[in-house]
Image: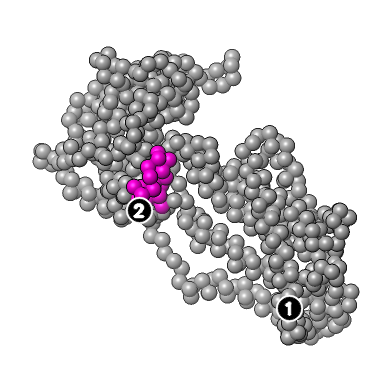
Amino acid sequence: MAGTETAPAGGRRTEGDLAGLEAGLDALDSVQVKRTPLRQVLLHKVLPPVTAALLVLVVWKILVLAHVTDDYKLPDPSAVWGGLRELWLNGTLLDIVWTSVSRGLLGFLAALAIGTPLGLLVARVPLVRAALGPILSGLQSLPSVAWVPAAVIWLGITDAAMYAVILLGAVPSIANGLVSGIDQVPPLYLRAGRTMGATGARGARHVLLPAALPGYIAGLKQGWAFSWRSLMAAELIASSPDLGLGLGQYLENARTDSDMPGVLLGILLILFVGIAIDLIVFSPLERRVLRTRGLAVR
Amino acid sequence: MAPALSTDTPQPFHPADGTSATAVLDEGIPAAVRIDHVHKSYGRPGAERPVLDDITLDVRPGEFVCLLGASGCGKSTLLNLVAGLDRPSAGTIEVPGGRPALMFQEHALFPWLTAGRNIELALRLRGVPRAARREEAERLLELVRLGGSYGKRVHELSGGMRQRVALARALAQDSRVLLMDEPFAALDAITRDVLHHELTRIWERTRLSVVFVTHNVREAVRLGERVVLLSSRPGRVVREWEVDIPQPRRIEDAAVADLSVEITEELRGEIRRHGRN
């Protein structure tokens, strides 16, 4: 039956005309997706934060040179640098960082394994949502450092106590992220899925979960931040020589020794690790998901 | 070229619930869609708001029917009922050829999949084996003249291209009935014109039964073999027109314009009625 539309009378447009018109429309209206060149990325994304960090360093140095306060309260930046060099040279730097990072990541993975099914349940089962929804949101605003005393009494000063604190901090935000991701799925996608036969488990797998992914990843990102914060709080408070030296203990040791360069170094290392994990793991993941959906601006 | 889509025998689809025997038209041919004394109201019992009132409509196999009406005539509600997304308050709906495909005003393509993958998902949900999916998806894209767009992301496509991919995805369901809910309403006039042509071409090729909902009189006359005018609040069938202008029509054809004027008059009368009471 193809070809019946080829026009009989004059003045009718032919198939060729139409194909040309269509091709023209397609070309005019399509969005060209371009990648930003590396130079521009460096100029607009890397340069500003580096400049800001350098400015902070300069102000710090000026304050030291102006003797605004005693040396033991505000040490010279070079003293902090010296502390870092010393840790590196005696080979303990990577050990300290790895002790904390491995705990943090392991705890985060456990939180992921618990928070994801929990979030699904809360999002999809009304009774569970009514019961647990408010508790989960409430837990998110409870600083997880508040759990440290309880965890220590229950579990002693052990690794288990550390993980308990991480879980209590990270599980609610991962679950909440998934819940809000699912809540924000446009109903149109679900209707389209249902007309194609994607109902029940198939609907969850092919429509609901992929559609909820951006919210879920935002939850993961926040979940990591909570894991890391909780862990540092736990390490600071519940430090014991048996546990191995993590960043929190290092910081606490520096405080008991009144070693201000060590304290500042500890703070900077904790900050650095938090930023690094976000930059290496979560931001690329988030950008990738948003970009394939045409949601990322850059 | 006939579409090589059928892989399995379609199961009768009863959107409402299990109902009586297969619908049969007066002439003895089974109807593609049979809507029988359907009522639909929303709201609490006692304070119901009727949306559809006693709609009876049969769609012949291979027929292109346009449902026309102003806002509030329940056009979309009726399509949702036929698609099985909602249940009628009374009456029955039968679609003997299996679950109908549905196209929306928004393309409703999944942004996490490429154009080709969107089509493949419909194939997969229909039970097409993995090995055959890619080729079938390419063939359907070819059919809507988007060959080579397999790997394109939804946001990289123009509005008209998105609706064509959505059409290909609907065709991938291999349903004998295609429901379309104002699918071109958000497009500019030239793109819409091109898509009218594409839809007519594909319909002539596949001989699907199409139920096309619109508020655009000219569009209804341009596309349909039959135009059904619905009243508003509640929706009732007011009048039907058989459109015997041969395809290919153009929206600016004199015959299309003449019939549109007549139908528009009737539609305006319906709308005016609401201003009086």
Instruction: Give above or below for A116 relative to A241.
Output: above
Q: Chain of mark 1?
A: A
Residue position for label 2: B150
State the image coordinates of residue B28 (x, y, percent, origin top left). 26, 16
Query: What is the number of the mark on residue B23?
Result: none
Which quarter of the figure is the N terminus of chain A placed in?
top left
Query: What is the number of the mark on residue A93?
Result: 1
Instruction: Give above or below for B88 relative to A272.
Output: above
Q: Magenta span: helix, strand or loop, mainly?
A: helix
Q: Nearer the viewer, residue A134 or A54?
A: A134
Q: Residue shown at 58%/16% (left/top)?
A: B45
Residue B244: quarter of image: top left
Element class at badge 1: helix
How many other residues sit within 10 Å of disc 1, few (<14), some (14-19) or many (≥20)?
some
Residue range of the region highlighted in magenta in the rendering: B114-134
Instruction: Give above or below for B74 relative to B175.
Output: above
Q: Residue shown at 38%/31% (left/top)?
A: B100
Does the magenta segment cover residue B31? no
Q: Residue shown at 83%/66% (left/top)?
A: A236
State the image coordinates of residue B120 (x, y, percent, origin top left). 39, 46
